[in-house]
Image (cartoon, grey):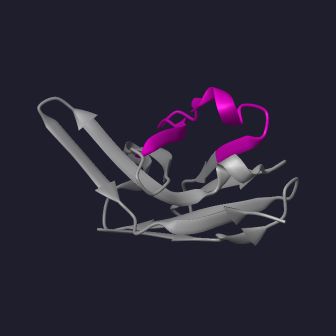
């Protein structure tokens, strides 16, 4: 199983980035996909979710600015981030979750750094 994030980097406040997560080694279409972020010394927090039927949910602080999407043919999940703020600076992690009790699985990527600074 692999989740490989890409697309992070340094961007000025107000700018945009698109993160990608390439999934392999599992049945992508049956997993809910999440983006989390983590700042050093803080707990990892859930930013956005997209379910197997395409339903999306967002943390209040990113609503209207971030968009999560998935490509079930290419096994990719994206996080389009617009109007970025310094508070968005963090390591962003891709997460895949399968839950069909009692079978529960969760996989993580290695993370990609996003830095918002002038």
Front-lying residue, 74 or 60: 60
Question: In which quadrant of the rendered image does the N terminus lie?
Answer: bottom left
Q: Position of residue 86 (x, y in %)?
A: 73, 52
- In the image, taking residue 12 as reference, residue 45 lies left or right, namely left
Q: What residue do we see at 84% from left, 66% from top?
A: 118
Q: Position of residue 19 (x, y in %)?
A: 64, 62
- Is residue 69 part of the magenta span, yes or no? no
Front-lying residue, 75 or 61: 61
Vertical position of residue 56 compared to residue 6: above or below: above
- Residue projecting furthest to the front: 41
Q: What residue do we see at 52% from left, 38% from top?
A: 49
Vertical position of residue 72 compared to residue 50: above or below: below
- In the image, taking residue 9 as reference, residue 6 lies left or right, namely left
Which image quarter: residue 54?
top right
Please provide the residue range marked out in magenta. 44-68
Q: Position of residue 48 (x, y in %)?
A: 56, 39
- Is residue 58 part of the magenta span, yes or no? yes
Which image quarter: residue 102?
top left
- How many numbered circles does the render carry? 0
- Residue projecting furthest to the left: 102
Q: What residue do we see at 48% from left, 48% from top?
A: 36
Q: Position of residue 38 (x, y in %)?
A: 47, 52
């Amino acid at each position: 199983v692999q989740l490989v994030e890409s697309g992070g980097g340094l961007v000025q406040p107000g700018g945009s980035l698109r993160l990608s997560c390439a999934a392999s080694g599992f049945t992508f279409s049956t997993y809910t996909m999440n983006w989390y972020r983590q700042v050093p010394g803080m707990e990892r927090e859930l930013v956005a979710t997209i379910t197997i039927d395409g339903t999306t949910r967002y943390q209040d602080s990113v609503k209207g600015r971030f968009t999560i999407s998935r490509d079930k043919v290419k096994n990719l999940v994206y996080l389009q981030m617009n109007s970025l703020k310094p508070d968005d600076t963090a390591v962003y992690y891709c997460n895949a979750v399968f839950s069909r009790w009692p079978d529960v699985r969760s996989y993580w990527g290695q993370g990609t750094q996003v830095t918002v600074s002038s």
